[in-house]
Image (cartoon, helix red, strand yellow):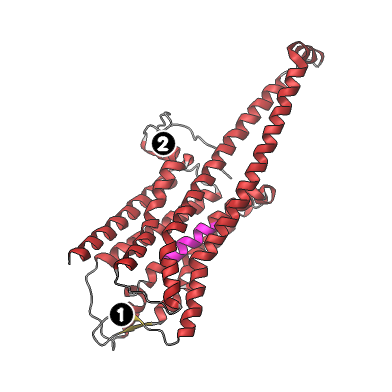
């Protein structure tokens, strides 16, 4: 009894953390009109899915147990859709699908920047397709779970597989959809992104070295004479410096987004690994006790994933930090005080 109460407290704590954390993220993003780039809209969708998941999670775990009647159509539907946790897992799968979409967005933005900018006019279409895909995809991919639920004579809702072969096939498919597929997308995309950024950094460093060498060779007197001979057109160098500073600011914003989403992906990989491999083993004929401490821990890992992301945004995503400070008129972590009347800060990271 004491163990059950401890698990109940932990689950409710994670649920409340996910609820409040994602509610804060949504509040800040909706109050800050400058955060309307495609990547930020994806993050809003991520937080909205996680917020909804937290609500479902809390309701499931605070609701009293119900004795079901196998002859009742309503009870059969209630068992299949709700008590089986089909709705919860469908939303969790949708969350992982949205995370994959965010990763692909960052991949195309960094690796194929020219093509990515050409899609700016279709931002609404891309967002609409992504939202529809992530909110319905989980329910479609996980629908088998609702269909295999049955009510026992003593009123419990349990999964019953009619075919071990079908169980193995579907189990492997779900493993691909919920873990291996998203993980593969994340690993490949971020390796390509890191390689691209490394090449860009090297090229920028080489260009800066060449500029420094040219400035040293020309000398101050020669530059002054050159400016005099050309009608005092010395401001070209100043314009280059301004452009360079602007480029650096945008690169910092882009790197902040990448660092944030890379952290989110790593946390996802860690939180989902135990239950993904356990469920795969179970569907291939292995033993898995759904009431055991081990299973409850693996499930708690997945549940914690929906509560962790808001903390990552708060501590790593600079645009979100500035928006949070601007909304509440608090002091930023890097020593800049931002008030609600302050003009918009960072450029959007594309």
Q: Quadrant of the N terminus?
A: bottom left
What is the secondary structure assignment of the residue under circle 2?
helix
Q: For residue 342, say whether it is visible.
A: yes
Taking depth in this image into account, of 218 and 238 the one nearest to the observer is 218
Taking depth in this image into account, of 68 and 231 the one nearest to the observer is 68
Q: Quadrant of residue 236?
A: top right
Main SS category, magenta section = helix
Q: Which residues are magenta?
A: 91-101
Q: Is residue 100 magenta?
A: yes
Q: Is residue 37 magenta?
A: no
For image coordinates 47% across by 56% down, the residue present is 45
Q: Nearer the viewer, mark 1 or mark 2?
A: 1
What is the secondary structure assignment of the residue under circle 1?
strand
Q: For residue 124, say whether it is visible.
A: no
Image coordinates for residue 223, horizontal then vertical, percent: 76, 15
Image coordinates for residue 307, horizontal then vertical, percent: 37, 54
Label of residue 157 in the image: 1
Q: Quadrant of the C terminus?
A: top right
Image coordinates for residue 104, horizontal then vertical, percent: 58, 56
Label of residue 326 in the image: 2
Marks 1/2 in contact by CB < 8 Å: the verdict is: no
């Amino acid at each position: 009894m004491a163990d059950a109460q401890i698990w109940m407290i932990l689950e409710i704590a994670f649920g409340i953390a996910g609820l409040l954390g994602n509610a804060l993220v949504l509040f800040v993003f909706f109050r800050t009109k400058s955060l309307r780039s495609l990547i930020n809209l994806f993050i809003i969708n991520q937080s909205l899915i996680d917020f909804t998941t937290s609500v479902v999670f809390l309701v499931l775990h605070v609701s009293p147990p119900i004795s079901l009647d196998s002859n009742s159509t309503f009870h059969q539907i209630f068992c299949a859709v709700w008590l089986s946790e089909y709705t919860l897992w469908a939303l969790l799968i949708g969350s992982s699908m949205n995370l994959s979409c965010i990763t692909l967005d960052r991949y195309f933005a960094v690796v194929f920047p020219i093509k990515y900018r050409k899609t700016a006019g279709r931002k609404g279409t891309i967002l609409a397709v992504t939202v529809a895909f992530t909110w319905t995809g989980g329910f479609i991919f996980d629908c088998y779970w609702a269909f295999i639920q049955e009510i026992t004579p003593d009123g419990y809702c349990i999964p019953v597989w009619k075919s071990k072969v079908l169980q193995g096939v579907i189990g492997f498919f779900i493993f691909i959809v919920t873990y291996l597929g998203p993980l593969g997308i994340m690993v490949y995309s971020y390796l390509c992104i890191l390689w691209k950024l490394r090449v860009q950094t090297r090229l920028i460093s080489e260009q800066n070295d060449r500029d420094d060498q040219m400035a040293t060779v020309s000398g101050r007197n020669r530059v002054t004479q050159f400016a005099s001979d050309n009608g005092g057109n010395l401001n070209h160098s100043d314009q280059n410096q301004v452009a360079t500073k602007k480029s650096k600011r945008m690169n910092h914003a882009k790197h902040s987004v990448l660092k944030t989403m890379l952290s989110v992906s790593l946390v996802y990989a860690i939180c989902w690994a135990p239950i993904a491999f356990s469920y795969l083993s179970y569907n291939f004929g292995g033993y898995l006790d759904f009431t055991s401490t081990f299973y409850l821990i693996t499930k708690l890992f997945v549940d914690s994933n929906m509560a962790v992301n808001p903390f990552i945004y708060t501590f790593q995503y600079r645009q979100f930090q500035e928006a949070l400070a601007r909304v509440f008129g608090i002091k930023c972590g890097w020593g800049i005080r931002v008030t609600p009347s302050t003009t918009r800060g960072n450029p959007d990271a594309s």
